[in-house]
Image: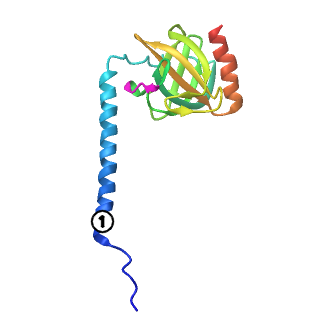
């Protein structure tokens, strides 16, 4: 008795090549889509750098969630690194908020550009429990942007939502 041939090598190689070709095609299409989004959003001005004389009164460690067009939580802002999620420390000063990010550009939002703050459950394709995200709506040039932040610890998140967001909405 002979055992049956286990592998049909030509068929297996063809399927492997098709899978690799499909993955490369999808990656290329995603890259083209991101580049087109960058072209469409090129009129959005760069956010402010953190001022040299900025003094943090409070800070909260957490996760920066990608910025989106205000009111459209699936329309990610791709330019100036605003669409890149990252570890972040939000520092709150007397005149504004500093988003100090790891692996992405840090930026500053003056309180004069803040339109509203709220807690929400989703932004940029990320969903959490009720009130799981602090969302800052602010003006960058002529564009209104929603920026999401989620503090590392539950107590910090609750404190950030209650104290800081509540104070800015008052």
Count of numbered marks: 1
- The residue furthest right is 155
Q: Give the percent coordinates (x, y) of residue 105.
A: 43, 28
Q: Can the viewer see residue 54 in this picture?
A: no
Location of the N terminus (image quadrant) = bottom left
Q: Which residues are magenta?
A: 74-79
> Which residue in the rendered view is the most extreme toward the bottom?
1
Residue bearing the label numbered 1: 13
Q: How is the image coloured?
A: rainbow
Residue 101 vs residue 8: left or right? right
Residue 46 or 79: which is nearer the viewer?
79
Q: Can residue 125 be seen here?
A: yes
| Residue pictured at 63% horizontal, 29% vertical | 132
- Image location of residue 146, percent across then percent down: 50, 20
Q: Is residue 170 magenta?
A: no
- Place residue 142 in its image quadrant: top left
Front-lying residue, 122 or 88 = 122
Q: Position of residue 10 (x, y in %)?
A: 28, 69
> Is residue 76 found inside the magenta-colored segment of the image?
yes
Task: Tell me the crowding category of disc 1: few under 14, some 14 to 19, or many 20 or more residues within 10 angstroms, Cα based.
Answer: few
- The residue lying at 61 percent from left, 18 percent from top is 118
Q: Quadrant of residue 143?
A: top left
Residue 129 location (% of width, % of height): 64, 32
């Amino acid at each position: 008795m002979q055992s049956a041939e286990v592998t049909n090598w030509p068929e297996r190689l063809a399927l492997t090549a098709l899978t690799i070709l499909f993955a490369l095609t999808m990656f290329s299409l995603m890259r083209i889509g991101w580049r087109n989004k960058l072209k469409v959003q090129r009129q959005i001005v760069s956010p402010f750098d953190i001022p040299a004389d900025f003094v943090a009164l409070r800070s909260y460690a957490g996760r920066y969630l990608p910025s989106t067009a205000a009111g459209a939580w699936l329309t990610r802002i791709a330019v100036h690194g605003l669409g890149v999620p990252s570890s972040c420390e939000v520092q709150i000063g007397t005149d504004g908020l500093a988003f100090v990010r790891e692996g992405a550009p840090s930026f500053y939002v003056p309180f004069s550009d803040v339109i509203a703050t709220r807690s929400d459950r989703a932004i940029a394709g990320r969903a959490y429990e009720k009130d799981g995200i602090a969302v800052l709506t602010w003006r960058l040039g002529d564009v209104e942007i929603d920026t999401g932040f989620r503090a590392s610890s539950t107590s910090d998140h609750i404190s950030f939502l209650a104290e800081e967001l509540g104070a800015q909405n008052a």
